[in-house]
Image: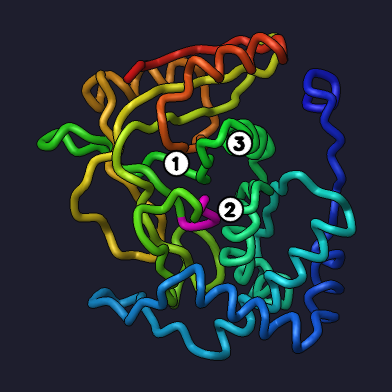
């Protein structure tokens, strides 16, 4: 579908392709990446919950080494985006490798090379569109609905678009990742307050790719400190009605979260790509 309807070339890569490049990362490359990580992120102290751990020198160096391997992978295969998934098995080497990609993939996403976890190729395209519109495009899913304060909590434990973070993003050590195997360093932030747009890509029963968008607002307020990106998003519809209307289009459970109201531009993109666009809410 992506080849035929978007003209995209999908390069199917193996964990071995990444492992080889991670293993061959040179000490000076790793040191430079550690310095970059310190410039971009704040290192969090352990929280009061039972899963937050210190970001140790060892775990930071491993994340930096994996990030170097990801940079080389992108360069060698001329990648414009990355959709990835590894289930993990009994703490094997690939599970450790897969658990170390969050920091590197967040840096890639901020550079305009969107990294979409859980193998969601459709969302990788949505993230790419949002990035090219100058809106960011952070890897996101629905967490919860707050009916008292009338907002939807959205985010993910994985690569966020740190360039649109509200303040310096945080690295937090996790003894257990949320919803998947492994442990290590994770990225935590909420996106800038103000106007936002979410963009998803799904498909019709006829096999046509389809875009799905909504405009809203990112609200200030307390957020969970759990090593995930998370933001309080308010739409013109109440949370339950919004979720019903969004879900009626059969979306994937991910979307690309960006800053600003972007539906006017997205409509033009949809027309150029000859894709159906469903607008659920306008800001």
Mark 1–mark 2 distance (CA, rounded to whole Å)? 18 Å
**Mark 1 residue element:** strand
Q: Residue at x 88, y 53 (%)?
A: 77
Residue highlighted by disc 2? 110
Residue 160 covered by magenta stretch: yes
Count residues near mark 1 (Cα–Cα under 10 Å), then give few for <14, some for 14-19, many for 20+. many
The segment highlighted magenta reads 157-161
Residue 14 locus on image (x, y percent): 84, 59
Identify the secondary structure beneath mark 3. Answer: helix
Residue on which disc 1 sits: 141
Residue 244, by quadrant, is: top left
Q: Which quadrant holds residue 227?
A: bottom left
x and y, in percent, of residue 133 in the image: 58, 31
According to the picture, the residue beneath numbered tag 3 turns out to be 123
Q: Quadrant of residue 30?
A: bottom right
Q: CA distance from mark 3 to mark 2?
A: 16 Å
Q: Main secondary structure of the magenta part?
A: loop
């Amino acid at each position: 579908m992506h080849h035929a309807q978007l003209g995209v070339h999908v390069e199917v890569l193996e964990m071995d392709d990444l492992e080889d490049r991670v293993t061959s990362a040179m000490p000076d490359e790793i040191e430079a990446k550690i310095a970059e990580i310190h410039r971009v992120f704040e290192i969090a102290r352990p929280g009061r919950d039972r899963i937050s751990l210190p970001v140790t020198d060892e775990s930071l160096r491993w994340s930096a080494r994996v990030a170097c391997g990801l940079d080389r992978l992108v360069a060698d295969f001329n990648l414009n985006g990355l959709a990835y998934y590894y289930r993990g098995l009994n703490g094997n080497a690939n599970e450790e490798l897969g658990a170390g990609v969050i920091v590197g993939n967040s840096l890639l996403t901020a550079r305009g090379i969107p990294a979409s976890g859980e193998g969601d190729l459709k969302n990788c395209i949505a993230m790419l569109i949002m990035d090219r519109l100058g809106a960011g495009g952070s890897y996101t899913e629905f967490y919860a609905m707050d009916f008292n304060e009338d907002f939807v909590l959205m985010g993910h434990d994985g690569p966020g678009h740190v360039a649109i973070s509200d303040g310096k993003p945080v690295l937090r050590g996790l003894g257990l990742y949320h919803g998947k195997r492994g442990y290590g360093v994770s990225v935590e932030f909420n996106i800038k307050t103000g106007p936002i747009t979410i963009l998803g890509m799904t498909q019709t029963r006829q096999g046509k790719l389809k875009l799905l968008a909504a405009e809203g607002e990112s609200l200030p307020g307390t957020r969970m400190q759990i090593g995930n990106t998370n933001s309080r998003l308010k739409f013109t519809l109440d949370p339950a009605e919004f979720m019903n209307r969004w879900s009626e289009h059969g979306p994937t459970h991910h979307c690309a979260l960006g800053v600003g109201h972007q539906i006017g531009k997205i409509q033009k993109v949809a027309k150029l790509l000859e894709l159906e666009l469903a607008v659920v809410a306008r800001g």
